[in-house]
Amino acid sequence: MRRFDVVRRLFEGKQDAAGSGQKNNTDGAFSGGKKGREKLDEISGFFVRPGNYNLPGAHALRGGVNFSINSEGATSCELLLFHRKQSAPYAILPIPESYRMGHVYSIFVAGLDAEDFEYAYRMDGPYDPAKGLYFDRNKLILDPYCRAVTGQRAWGAAKTPTDYHARVVKDRFVWKGNDFLHTPMEDTIIYEMHVRGFTRHHTSGVGYPGTFAGIIQKIPYLKELGVTAVELLPIFEFDEMINARTHNGRLLLEYWGYNTVAYFAPNTSYTASIEYNEEGSELKQTIRLLKKAGIEVILDVVFNHTAEGNLTGPFYQFKGIDNDIFYSKSPEGDYYNFSGCGNTVNANHPLVTRYIIDCLRYWVTEFHVDGFRFDLASILTRDENGAPMSDPPLIRQIAMDPVLAGTKLIAEPWDAGGLYQVGSFPAHNRWAEWNGRYRDSIRDYLRGNYWQAAEAAARITGSMDMYGKAPYQGYRSSVNFVTCHDGFTLYDLFSYDHKHNEANGWNNTDGTDDNRSWNCGVEGYTDDPVIQALRKKMMCNAVTVLMLSRGTPMILSGDEFCNTQYGNNNGYCQDGEISWLNWDFLRANRDYFDFVKNVIAFRKQHLVISRELPPAHCGLPPVTCCGANPDDHSIGMGNKVLGILYAGWREDLGEDEVVYMVINAFWEPQEIRLPALSDGLAWGLNIYTDADGGPRFYESLFVYNPVMTLKERSVAVLTLYKPEEY
């Protein structure tokens, strides 16, 4: 029996295809009966009707599958169906012009089982490069709203855009209630990780290395560390083989994942199991278990460019749909390249803005993600001609969207075109920023540039000079970091004066030269115990300052146990020892891991660090910046010592909470005086990064003398102490 005849019987309410004799109704809008039969068409042997125009993408409905795709410039559209893993279509369905409403082509194909096929489109239209039109009816088009992409499963296997077919997803995952944690920004501690690199190394000890399931097995570790959110480098479907090349016998890939292929689809090579038409279940389970452990999930998203590259790049999606709309182009017809990756998304065009909002909503509603970090977000503030906009529609709409209202929005406020918006991003009282000025000033000050003390003090106390008024939310708008995926690891920051990117194949010309690093006397590895101890102390200094700074701290995965990239500060193409976390470093540096864990716990315990409290009863001001003498509040070029004091009243404890951090950035010991306290109070030492035997934590070591010597390049943290309580 022909497919058309089988489906007609279904729609007429007769025996189903299995001969069960049961009545069969399809989508409620298209049931059986004479009225329904009159609406049916036959195309290429399939029983079809106009689809639901409000359902972009492909959706399995009762009795068949609904397909919708929009194009302003196309003159015709074909739907191609493929048997699984086949390159030639078994059916081509021209979508009738009568099935087009406005710019949307929509068709419901009855009798299709989502698990039996893959699909793609072809579009015809004008070819006019001068107008940015590149329609080609011979090219396959990947559905921009597809939720699963074929041909991507095997990591590192050769692929071409002609392998990009889509699958229809059947969502059988059930969320159990509202599990959004809504951790305030001031209580959030972000852990930036690459899904594959986090557990791919054989030392990780997980059963499914390099996958979402591998993260699940490390949840107890993340909970022990104390982080409250993981920020995942791109997990939307990407093709790691784009721009793949060989250097010195090693295959170099697009490892980081910043060339997005499909914005609604999880990366299939990150799953431990083959999910086929249940794509996303493993990721959803990972997210659910992380939330159960009190850990939010933030996605690093890339809306500034796509994997289609420049005019000579791949052609598989937006180039063949509405190239003139989706990409920003110069008057000469070339793509603007503010991303450094070949093209720039025209993000503030209404159609593109809607697409991005749809995507963000999808990941919140279907995957329950808690927030987004927007790569090169300054591009999203540019108009179609590349000029920055004072009030870009996309940024405003994301900030005001009701579905996204509870999510964290974090901008990387710069781009590769030179637009730097740290402290000037159009935040709408919603957006936070990666604070690049924090990173630079803390690196400078800790390596000995003590004349940067005033800048460091401003960054440590919440960058209120930048974020203290609208459209910002004070220190809640500042995401503080010393290291991230893009640059040196924390260990390398104090082990290398210069980048060592030779393995990338560009003669060490790639990656930034502005590292503000210090090798502590020897470039790279050394077995000198004095230098090793100095490096560990410098790392302890950095993590202590980071965790005692106002704003949201972010640490790079592996920094908590001295992971190294061997001086490579641009590991975007390194799928191996350079980029994978080597968990042997955790076993070798357990003392340092414990230090990091304890500093995180200290921050959580002392709320006065992360937020403003009611005024302290002891009379100390909420925030004080000083030098070696706490009465000298003038921070100038000669401040070798920087003191930061937080004070406030803890309603829940019924007492004052005071934390005093003092930093000696100089290479010689410095004498400091502790702030005077009222009778009955004293200072207790809690953290000292140059104690006898190395960095130390104390319950509260009573400090008898108001004058103490702070050793060279060290940090001390003290709190209020009541001797009679001990």
Image (cartoon, helix red, strand yellow):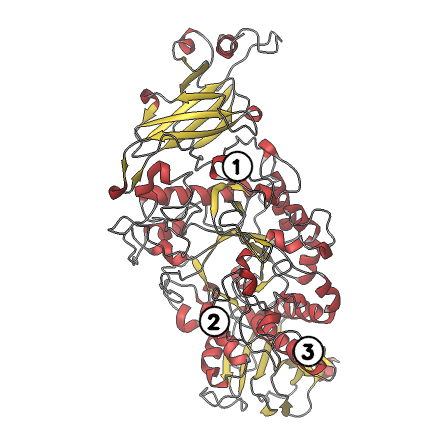
- Mark before the other along the chain sequence, 2 or 1: 1
Residue 511 is labelled as none
The relative height of residue 414 versus residue 300 in the rendered view (above or below) is below
Instruction: Provide the residue designation for mark 2.
Output: 513
Horizontal arrangement in the rendering, residue 421 relative to residue 439 (left or right)? left
Residue 579 location (% of width, % of height): 61, 59
Which SS class for mark 2?
Answer: loop
Spatial separation of the CA atoms under disc 2 and disc 1: 38 Å
Residue 172 visible to the viewer: no
Q: Amino acid at mark 1?
A: Val
| Residue 140, picture quadrant | top left
Residue 684 at x, y percent in the picture: 67, 82
Within-10-Å neighbours for mark 3: few <14, some 14–19, many 20+: some
Q: Which residue is mark 3?
A: 532
User: Which quadrant holds residue 714?
Assistant: bottom right
Q: CA distance from mark 3 to mark 2?
A: 24 Å
The amino acid type found where label 2 is placed reads Asp
Instruction: Give the residue furthest to the front.
Output: 248
Helix or strand or loop: what does disc 1 sit on? loop
Which residue: 52% across, 30% down? 168
User: Can you tell which mark lies on residue 149?
Assistant: 1
Q: What is the quadrant of residue 564 in the picture?
A: bottom right
Q: Amino acid at mark 3?
A: Gln
Q: Indicate the quadrant containing the N terminus: top left, top right, bottom left or bottom right.
A: top right
Question: Given contact means CB atoms under 8 Å apart, are the residues at marks 3 and 1 in contact?
Answer: no
Which residue is found at the position 27% from the left and 42% from the top? Answer: 129
Image coordinates for residue 594, horizontal then vertical, percent: 71, 69
Q: Where's residue 13, x and y in %?
A: 52, 8
Q: Residues within 10 Å of mark 2 (few under 14, many from 20)?
A: few
**Mark 3 and mark 1: Cα distance apart in space:** 47 Å
Q: In the displayed structure, would residue 463 be above or below residue 85?
A: below
Q: Of callouts 3 and 2, which one flags the residue occurring earlier in the amino acid sequence?
A: 2
